Image (spheres, grey):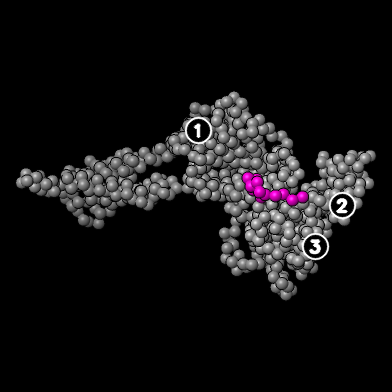
Amino acid sequence: MKSILQFTNKLISNEEFFSFVLIISIIVLLIIIYHRFFKRKQDSFLRYIRHFLLPFTCISGFAVYFIGYQFGSEADCSGWRLLSNFLESIFSTTRLFILGNDFVELEAPFKHGAIFHGMFALTAALAAFIFIAFVVQIFFKDFLTRHKILRRHFDENHLFFGINHATLSLASDLLKSNDKRLVVFVDDVNESENHKLYNELPSGAYVIKRASFFESISLEKDEGIFQLFQKQRNHKLSEGVKGGLFYHLNTLLRKLENTSTHLYFLTDEEDWNIEHANLALNEINALLDKKKIVNVKSIRIHTGTHSEISAKHFVKYIKLNSNLVTVSIHNYASIVTRQLIAEHHPVDSVEIDNMQAISKSDFNVLVIGFGQIGNHILRKLIEQGQFVGSDFHATIIDKYMGVLQGRFEYLYPGIPSNYNLSFVEAEAGHTKFYKEIKNIISYTNYIVISLGNDNLNIQTALEILEICHMMNEGKQKIFVHLEDEKHWKDTLKEYEGLIYIFGEVHKVYSEKNILQPDKEAQGERVHEVYRKLYGDNRLFSEISRHEQLSNISVAEHLYAKVKLLGYKNADDFSSHFSNSGEYINSLTNVQRLNLSKGEHLRWNAFYFVHGWTTIPLEEIEGETIEEKYNNRKNTALKRHSCLTSWENLEKLKGVIGEDMQKADIDSVLNLFNFINYNPQDNASKIYN
């Protein structure tokens, strides 16, 4: 016992032991700080080095050197000595970070002290560690990222080619709902992208480059240090294009196996998106054919377009060699429009007579700005804004209306002759613009502003509100397109209930809209009801895109029907009935008739806004009733004999031998099924 106590006392009094404990304690503390404050953050290790370890090492190094210089065997506290030692300490500290030191310059009494020597060794080791981490970050970051990707198991793969605010928003939303998704941004694939956006990546997202090792350590310009051993070339594109889209991306190709994969081409350049999506499709088809990738669950390629013409052109030429590969085309204007209608349906802007299921007021629209978004919104408002008892009128204002009107009437020839539209050529801010606003503001009940500039959109909305105030008109709801609303939060809060925002990038590019669009799912449910109703064996994925959009249009109009019947929404409607039969029994003959007429108005509008025109009764080809029935529509020429009034459908029946009003009535009778139908529920009854 005595010997143990003597040994313990010897250890406690031993300076080297105290130094050992001190150094170990500091190391443990540094590890604890990392795990406690940094580990869960994005780029945790780099943040830890940058914001804590580097400052700590600098302070420690300076303290060690200053003490060693200042308090040696001949301590001198004169001003000159203090300044000289201060500057020398700074210089010596910086040398630590390039694997050098000035230990030999220190005064002997401190140099050989255990505590001082231990702190110096720790500081030098930390400086060397930071230097090595810096080198690895510069030269081997991409290698480490690829290794980390291969080592981890992910539920899904989401690979982004190109970066912008839209893809950042989507990536963030994907990781927010499931952090076991692999989200990768491929750098060096689009030479015009803004590389500063890579600093805004959401936590959990990876960045890898297609560049080779030598390319990755070259400078951006041709004077890179390894350019001496290569021919001069475009750093960002040449080798990648020659080698294919997946050049130097074997890591990602290996992740395609046994997992569902999504590839995104959603940059701001429409042509680039389509070109590279097609390139990816061709490469994947070739890899599947050659069995270079196997056990693939599914691959879905997403591309973004701004115009319908580009989307149609792309669809026409894509080749899908495998049912494992699908292509989704996302039109920004279309998504924005659906968002607007879903949140602010036209039926909420008219007065309703629930007993008759009709509108008691007209639906008057003002669309300011007639670009891609304004065009889509006008057509969707025509489609969803037709009500029995209501007249539709729209005023459209744009400074380039001469060209835009001509193109619109050429692409959609059935609209001008069937709907009351007023096209006005005026620029926001000009006298003619304000004059037109004052002429129509008193009876307008749905105002949409989409001028292509967030600041101009908000400014125009505020000016219209001022006009309303000066003319003592009622409070107008104004729907303003803003891609980024954060700069206008205070203004929007002040005008809450008057100005409504739609089209924010973070809401448009979300998992809900890109991967799991609600309206697509509802359109598929509508199709399932129609399949059972009419004995159609085709799946939703097997029908034409026009037919899919038609079913989606029915789904979008369900809200209007339940509102016309006096219910708050689809959930409120469903809560009042246990099955479709109860709902049908609740309808009066007047409600059933008016809803059927309204459904036919919607059906007509859907076809007109997609470029169809009417086949007059006398122009239906055929000698017999059966031939005339078969020729009632011409899909190639986009002509249909049913594009006529509800009353004229009675006359059409005498020509083709079929009651075409029945389809509209069937749609009304199956309203409950459209909302609640479950294919697995055998008890569901379809009414016709």
Q: What stretch is highlighted in magenta?
A: 677-688
Q: Nearer the viewer, residue 155 or 688?
A: 688
Amino acid at pointer 2:
Leu
**Disc nearer the start of the sequence (3/2):** 3
Q: Residues within 10 Å of mark 1 (few under 14, many from 20)?
A: some
Is 174 drawn above or below residue 455 in the view shown? above
As measured in the structure, the alpha-carbon distance from the residue carrying label 3 to the one carrying label 1 is 64 Å
Is 47 drawn above or below residue 564 in the view shown? above
User: Which secondary structure lies at badge 2?
Assistant: helix
Give yes or no for residue 687 being in the magenta stretch. yes
Q: Is residue 648 left or right of residue 300?
A: right
As measured in the structure, the alpha-carbon distance from the residue carrying label 1 to the one carrying label 2 is 61 Å
Residue 99, located in which quarter of the rendered image? top left
Dot 1 corresponds to which residue? 251
Q: In this view, which residue lies farthest toward the left?
A: 2
Q: How crowded is mark 2: few (under 14 residues within 10 Å), some or many (20 or more)?
A: some
Q: In this view, does 155 lie to the left or right of 476?
A: left
Q: Which mark is residue 649?
A: 2
Residue 237: percent from the left, percent from the top?
Answer: 58, 34
Circles 3 and 2: CB distance less than 8 Å? no
Q: Nearer the viewer, residue 665 or 437?
A: 665
Residue located at (28% from left, 53% from top): 83
